[in-house]
Image: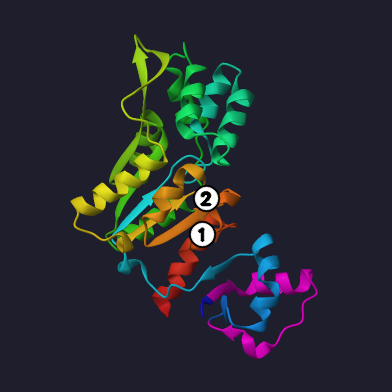
């Protein structure tokens, strides 16, 4: 039997919008903000499909505080930040629509990441890297409450890592901004200050992301259960599977059946509220 948490307001909205009757005894009040129900309840058996298809957030009850974990691993583009940085570079040369379409196909799992990133990067040939500063200063937007989330995690001494299929210039900017410990990303080949349309070194694809977690876990003498990982697309799936707590942050549907928590609203504020609840329990 699996126990689930749900925000009280979300539960009431779900009940109201779908005109559902339920047995009050199946729903437990845990706090002012949270209710719970379990997988054996009539409510869940009858409405689980509708719950999963709706935008209603409900969460497997892990009953753990942040001090149960030792490492946080996050994707960056569309996870820690609101942007896809390659789309912002493409916007400089009026190719944002074309590259964004390739990005979306990749995130949905319809195109291999290696082929996708090579194809997209090739379209960026000739871009002057001086333009990256404009993107950093004017375009990149952190997700709401991500600063508060990272600060909260740091209170419990977790190592904080970015593992991104994006590019080192932008990943290092975000790592420094959020004061995270380490970062891994793809490196654009640059000659005389201009992009060549190629990459340097190994591609940070799904397999590489998972291997980075395995390497870090071994390096720090952790266990996979000590890791929280957060991502939003198909390229994060293997990384998420290597973690004790896997979180889809407003992620693509391909992730829903594989992660422990699907965050669909209020993003990092939701995470903070969940762990604050466990902390106060």
Q: Which residue is drawn at 52% across and 50% down?
A: 144
From the top left corner, tell me how far across and down residue 96 is, in percent: 60, 24
Q: Residue at x 34, y 9 (%)?
A: 192
Viewer can see residue 180: no
- The residue drawn where x is 65% and y is 70% is 48
The residue nearer to you, when weighing 33 against 66, is: 66
Q: What element carries label 2?
A: loop
Q: Mark 2 points at which residue?
A: 144
* Residue range corresponding to the magenta coloring: 4-30
Q: How crowded is mark 1: few (under 14 residues within 10 Å), some or many (20 or more)?
A: some
Residue 224 in sight here: yes
Label 2 crowd (10 A; few <14 / some 14-19 / many >=20): some
Q: Quadrant of residue 257?
A: bottom right
Picture coordinates of residue 159, whole percent (x, y): 28, 54
Q: Do residues under tags 1 and 2 come within 8 Å of each other at their CB atoms?
A: yes
Tell me: residue 266, above or below residue 86: below
Identify the disc placed on residue 269: 1
* Residue 22 is one of the magenta-drawn residues: yes
């Amino acid at each position: 039997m699996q126990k689930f948490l749900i925000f009280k307001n979300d539960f009431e909205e779900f009940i109201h919008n779908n005109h559902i009757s339920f047995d009050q005894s199946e729903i437990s009040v845990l706090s002012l903000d949270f209710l719970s129900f379990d997988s054996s309840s009539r409510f869940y058996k009858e409405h689980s499909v509708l719950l999963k298809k709706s935008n209603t957030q409900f969460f497997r009850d892990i009953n753990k505080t942040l001090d149960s974990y030792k490492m946080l691993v996050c994707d960056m583009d569309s996870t820690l930040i609101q942007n896809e940085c390659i789309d912002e570079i493409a916007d400089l040369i009026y190719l944002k629509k074309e590259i964004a379409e390739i990005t979306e196909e990749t995130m949905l799992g319809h195109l291999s990441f290696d082929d996708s990133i090579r194809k997209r990067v090739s379209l960026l040939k000739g871009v002057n890297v001086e333009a990256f500063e404009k993107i950093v200063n004017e375009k990149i937007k952190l997700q709401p409450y991500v600063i508060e989330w990272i600060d909260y995690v740091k209170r419990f001494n977790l190592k904080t890592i970015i593992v991104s299929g994006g590019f080192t210039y932008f990943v290092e900017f975000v790592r420094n901004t959020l004061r995270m410990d380490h970062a891994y990303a793809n490196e654009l080949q640059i000659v005389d200050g201009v992009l060549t349309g190629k990459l340097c070194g190994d591609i940070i694809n799904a397999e590489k992301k998972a291997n980075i977690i395995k390497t870090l876990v071994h390096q720090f003498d952790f266990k996979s259960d000590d890791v929280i990982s957060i991502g939003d697309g198909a390229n994060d799936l293997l990384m998420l599977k290597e973690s004790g707590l896997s979180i889809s942050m407003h992620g693509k549907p391909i992730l829903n059946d594989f992660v422990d928590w699907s965050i669909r609203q209020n993003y990092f504020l939701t995470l903070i509220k969940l762990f604050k609840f466990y902390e106060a329990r």
